[in-house]
Image (spheres, rainbow, N blue to C red):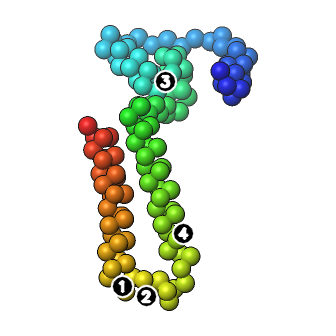
């Protein structure tokens, strides 16, 4: 367990919850509440408490979504490096490069794998 997780556990132990809220629900409503709590990575009590206090618990990312997010982060990094490289070229030289059709063609060829990767990520997420 990491130090951050240990601190959270200690804080939870320090809180004394002595009051109880009750609500009657149908079997279907109960099952839905349990399902929502699980998708958020919370206990049913924590989930209901947060909802009752006006918070909106978010569901945890699936492994698939985490992987896609990491890929998008990598793609963003690549774009940032490309943008920095283009900005580092003086304006007049930049115009010369982009006036050269061979350079533009090479530029486009280099961009194709990045675009293809974005399409793969999109397809992966929507499967």
In front of the other: 47 or 24:
47
Q: Nearer the viewer, mark 1 or mark 4?
A: 1
Circle nearer the N terminus (4, 2)? 4
Classify residue 23 by image quadrant: top left
Q: Is residue 62 above or below residue 117?
A: above
Mark 1–mark 2 Cα distance, whole angstroms, equals: 6 Å
Label 1 sits on residue:
100
The label shown at residue 96 is 2
Q: Secondary structure at mark 4?
A: helix
Mark 2–mark 3 Cα distance, whole angstroms, equals: 54 Å
Quadrant where the N terminus lies?
top right
In front of the other: 95 or 72:
95
Circle nearer the N terminus (3, 4)? 3
Instruction: Say which residue appears at 35% left-offset and 19% top-offset.
Output: 32
Left or right, 44 with respect to 113, comes to right
Q: Is residue 58 above or below residue 27?
A: below
Mark 3–mark 4 Cα distance, whole angstroms, equals: 39 Å
Q: Are marks 2 and 3 in contact (CB under 8 Å)?
A: no
Q: Are marks 1 and 2 in contact (CB under 8 Å)?
A: yes
User: For mark 1, does the 10 Å Cα neighbourhood hold few (<14), some (14 to 19), or many (20 or more) residues?
Assistant: few
């Amino acid at each position: 367990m990491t130090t951050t997780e240990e601190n959270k556990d200690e804080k939870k132990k320090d809180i004394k919850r002595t009051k109880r809220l009750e609500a009657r629900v149908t079997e279907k409503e109960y099952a839905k509440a349990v399902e929502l709590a699980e998708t958020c990575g919370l206990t049913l009590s924590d989930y209901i408490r947060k909802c009752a206090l006006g918070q909106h618990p978010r569901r945890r990312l699936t492994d698939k979504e985490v992987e896609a997010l990491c890929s998008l982060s990598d793609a963003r990094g690549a774009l940032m490096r490309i943008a920095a490289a283009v900005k580092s070229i003086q304006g007049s030289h930049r115009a010369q490069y982009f006036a050269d059709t061979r350079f533009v063609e090479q530029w486009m060829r280099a961009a194709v794998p990045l675009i293809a990767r974005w399409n793969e990520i999109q397809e992966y997420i929507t499967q």
